[in-house]
Amino acid sequence: MSWQIVVESAPYLLRGALSTVGIAAAVMVLGTAGGIILGLLNFTPWPWLRVAVTAAVEVVRAVPLLLLIFFIFFGLPALGVKIPTFPAAILAMALWMTVNTAEVVRGGIQSIARGQFEAGRSAGLSEVQLMRYVIFPQAVRRMIPPFVGLCTILVKDTSLAAIIGVFELTRAAQETIERTFKSFEIYVTAAAIYFVVCFPLTRLGQRAEARLHRT
Amino acid sequence: MTPAGAGFSWSAIARGLPYLLEGAGLTIVISAVAMVVAAVLGLGLAALSQAPGRLARRLVGAYVEVFRNTPLLIQIFIVYFGLPQLGLKLSPFLSGLSALVFYAAAYNTEIFRAGLEAVPRGQLEAARSLGLSALATLRWITVPQALRISFPALGNNLVSLVKNSSLVSTIGMVELMFVANDISFNNFRSFEIYGATAMIYVLLVLGLTRLLRVAERRLLRAT
């Protein structure tokens, strides 16, 4: 055991961690926007669109993220579409975040009591107004705990980008180990850094969940 | 070997399919074995955290939080690349399996703990007033009810486990993802092979989800 190595490589690992946070933030923005749109499509008046969205979300959600990354990075070039590592990883993770957020949005809206829909309609609101002013604001509160849980998983899963060579915390750890051969110390340190980011998120999710049940 | 790039090749899928299905079989076996061990471990730890005194509860809580808040990939790397440095060298198979077990067990512990705590207090008081010992209460009253409460969440965890098992391919443990990589790096038909692999995962996951839903309904009817 040599923890001296950890001190020496800390700045490099922290640079990786910064990249991890940046990637996660970018994916969160893209995936949340995409997920809200996709989730709301479940409540449009066109049955064919609802069926298509539900099927697409269910199918993509069933595919492991690692396979989504490999499909986009190794699979698409075979068709002549070459995407560099960084955008390929972002694209795959944003797709993953989009379908999972869509599921959270759908679940949140469906959990709102039918009476709320009926009351809104009988008050003369259009379907868009009903969603915008009555249903969505109530549903958002119920979406927050699962959404925060999703964000925690996302931060952990950004580690998969390292497999195709994207620079982030796990890649930084691998590069450090290639130089120092201290895999145990370095990976444990990387795990500790992930923990520092993820644990507060988990707690935040638990607190949101508790607050939801209190009211 | 066919050159890459020239159109979609169904024959590449046809040739790869038997190997992919074999890989899918391994994914099922690995997930099932890992889940069974992780369920036993999780139930044991959850029961332990109900023990009097704070120490057991704190230790179990620390295990759950550490394993749930760090990436599975890093946990796999620590077992496979890190532990040999401490003199514990495991094969890719044992490394991958044990990493999956400890990761899934952390979630299962939390699921069972919530399940145990959701059993109404009146049940415990009734058991006590009937003269059941603490252990007998756990065995005959609390655990059976907690299992029923926990079932849906356990099912979700199993579905996650099937998907997460793809990560052990990175240390050379043979399962569906490993087979897919192996084939597509050799025939360069990565679009077709990864596409077919994705469809196999979809069938596995959606099939499992349906199966769990049926089981859940049976379980509810039985009570």
Image (cartoon, grey):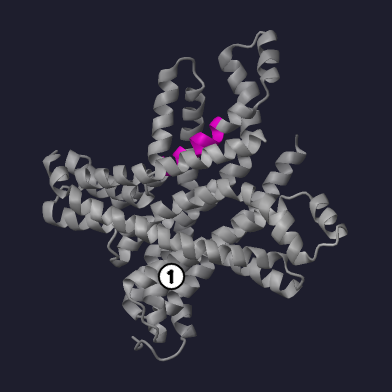
Image quarter hosting the N terminus of chain B:
bottom left
Extreme residue toward the bottom, this view: B6
**For mark 1, what is the residue?**
A91
Check residue B155 for magenta coloring.
Answer: no
Residue at 65 percent across and 11 percent down: it is: B128
Q: Percent from the top left, x then y, of residue A123?
A: 86, 57
Label 1 crowd bin: few (<14), some (14–19), many (20+), radius 10 Å: many
B203, A61: nearer the viewer:
A61
Image quarter of residue B89: top left
Q: Amino acid at mark 1?
A: Leu
Residue at 31 percent across and 63 percent down: it is: A163
Image quarter hosting the C terminus of chain B:
top right
A57, A70: nearer the viewer:
A57
Magenta region: B102-113
Secondary element under disc 1, as helix, strand or loop, is: helix
A42 relative to A7 in the view: left or right: right
Q: Is residue B193 visible?
A: yes
Q: Percent from the top left, x then y, of residue A10?
A: 19, 47
Q: Percent from the top left, x then y, of residue A169?
A: 28, 54
Q: Percent from the top left, x then y, of residue B176?
A: 43, 63
Residue at 77 percent across and 40 percent down: it is: B221
A114 relative to B166 in the view: left or right: right
Q: Is residue B22 visible?
A: no
Check residue B110 for magenta coloring.
Answer: yes
